[in-house]
Structures are given as structure tokens and as C-alpha cells.
Image: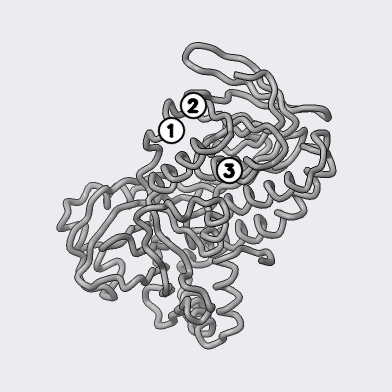
Amino acid sequence: MPSHSDIVVAGGGPVGAAFALAVADSRFSVTLLEARQQAKSPISQRTLALSYGTRLILERLNVWQTLQQITPIRDIHISQRGTIGVTRLHASEENVPELGYVVEYRALDAALQTALADSNIAVHYGTSVSASGGNRHLAWLNWQTKAASGMLTSRLAVIADGGNQTEPASQKQQKQYDQHALLAWISSERPHMNEAFERFTPDGPMALLPHGEGFALVLTAAPDKIRHWISLDENAFLTALHVHFGDRVGRFLTVRDRSSFPLRYSLTQHSAKDHRIFIGNAAHVMHPVAGQGFNLGLRDAWELANQIHACSHRHELGSTDMLARYQRARRLDVSASMLFTDQLVYWFTLADPVLRHARGLGLATLQQWPPLKHFVARRMMFGAQAW
């Protein structure tokens, strides 16, 4: 382990790995610390919804070309249970081949780890970061393995570990949603035809994402209701899901790999300070409605890489000017994405019948107003920024 590196990345998950690859050809030395013991050990069974903009970034990193088991999303059907208002988004109307894609987390991770192995980046597996800090000159990280521990200094420390505990809770704006998410893979009577469904219910939003020959299910509800869904046998679960979702894909036939996790909102108050920058889930955690979390984190990584490539000398890394430029570049996208998802959850879970009908009317209006629908589609694909 070196004692110093120009750039140190804490966390080798998809966001941290993508960032490291994006700066691999820079003039600066790059060291990546990853807590996993080996490159290809699975770290999540989840699926990810990738936007079309994310595809463009992964193509530039030469990762998209090696990614396996991708299911395109060409249409998105948005509805609210109990009202007739519906909005449909179509890739053909946006002049793109697909609106997004569904891929297993482990498949994306494997492609990124392979790319890291082929790069000149120094990757240290089995190395966790227990603390980080900095001053106006350098950043430092305390690292630990099974056999040793030490400190690594850098001109720029990039904290990309989604489980980051190096920043005190007092520095984060946090709240717990009174909801858990249930994840599963299901098959249905009718083929998905590359259409995704986002459905708002009184319990919480749910999504069916085309995945292989079936769907990846993301269902949100209060914790006790999710525990009840998990406890149901297969036939009872499929029957309840049909009642909950409706008949748009016919009967549900099979379900497997049910799991759940709690939902929360977290926003690091100062995502860039003291030669440190927090990106991805280390900087912001959002509700999974609209599937924007990973895509937002990848845009963090890409913008930060652009800022680094613009640096001519080492002393610019992590400087006050560079940190300020990065924050200005990311402020609108992060704040707009966090506000959008948070407010969607809030307004679509209010039980007032007048609001319920107003929401249905809003979806119907969106469907009939192409400029607004185009605006929503572009923001889902590229975020609140120009491309």
C-alpha cells in the first residue's frame, strides 16, 4: 500500500469503479480501496434501472460493450390505482433507441471489475476505510485490512462507498421513509414487450421492469405490509400482486428471490470539502421511485472526472476552486432529482380523495401535453443538465 496517491477512491462498487476508470488515463496516480476480498465476489442481488444517458457514459468507458444480460426499456407506462389518468413515454418519441435498460447489479459490477483489472489503476481489495478527513493541503484516509492498517494521504479523496460511515450523521440531512421495498423476479401471462410500469398505489409506488423473460418487481409499502408480502406462499403472493397491480400483463405465474430493505432519504450537507468529494450513495440516497439513484451517482462520477481532466497540475486537485466548480456543476441535477423523487412519494401517498383525482388528472394532462412529457422523459434519461 502506498502512503500517498494523487487520487484515492474509497469504494469500488459501480459508481466508484466507473469514476476510477474515467480518470485512469489522466496524468495523476489513482488508488482504489475496496472492502471486498476479491474482485468478483457478489455484492448485491438487486437489479438496476439504467437510463439512456447512463448507457452513453458506460460506452465512453468501454464497459457497455462487455455488459451481459441487458433488457431494454422502450416504453414506460405510468398510472395511479383507482383513477383513469395514464401517461405513456416512448423511446420513438424521444428519438432514442431505448429510454433505459434493466441489468443485474452483479453483471454491471463484474463488467466494471474486469475493466479495472485491465487498467493501470492500483486496486486494493479487502481494504476498508474507517475514517477520512482533510485540511486545506491534503486529504487522509485510515485504511484497514485483516493483516494491517495505516493512513493514506492524497490531493483528492473520492468517497464512493455507499455504506460510508466516515462522515458524522450531523453532516447529513436524513429521514426515514415509513416504507420498505420488496424486490423479486416474477413471470407473467403476457410478455413484457420491453415496457416498464410505474404504478402509484395508496401503500406506495411500485414498478415492474422488463428483465429477461419476466419482470423485476420493486414494491414499496409500510414495513409491516412488506413483511406480510414476504411471508405469503407463492400462490397467495401472486394473487395479491395481481389485485395490487391490475391486469395489464395478465396473471402472474411465478415469483422468486424475494427480499426487502428499508427506504431512506440522505443528503450530505457538504459533498465537497477539505480535498474530499462524496459521490453516489455516499453523497445522496433517494427513494427508488423512478429508478434514478444509480444514474444520479454515475453523473456525479462523470462530472468529477471531467473536472479532473481539466486540471493541469497536481496542486489543482482538491483545491477550493476545483471543489467549488464541481459543486456548481452538480447542484441543480442533485437537488432537482432529490426533490422530484421525494415529492413524488409524498404527494402520491396522500390519501385525500380530492388529491387522488387531481393526481389522475395530472397524469392525463401530462399524456396530452407533448412538450411537458418530452421534458419529463429527457430528465429521466439525462438528469437536470444539458447533454
Q: Measured from the top left, where is residue 218 in percent x and y? A: 37, 57
Amino acid found under the numbered disc labelled 3: Leu
| Labelled pair 1, 2 in contact (Cβ < 8 Å) | yes
Q: Which residue is mark 3?
A: 21
Q: Residue at x 58, y 29 (%)?
A: 122
Q: Which residue is mark 2?
A: 125
Q: Residue at x 43, y 25 (%)?
A: 37
Q: Which residue is mark 1?
A: 39
Q: Is residue 57 above or below residue 7?
A: below
Badge 3 or badge 2: first in the primary sequence: 3
Mark pair 1, 2: CA separation: 7 Å
Badge 1 or badge 2: first in the primary sequence: 1
Element carrying mark 1? loop
Can you tell which quarter of the image residue 296 is in? bottom right
Element carrying mark 3? helix
Judged left or right of residue 350, residue 167 is right
Image quarter hosting the N terminus: top right
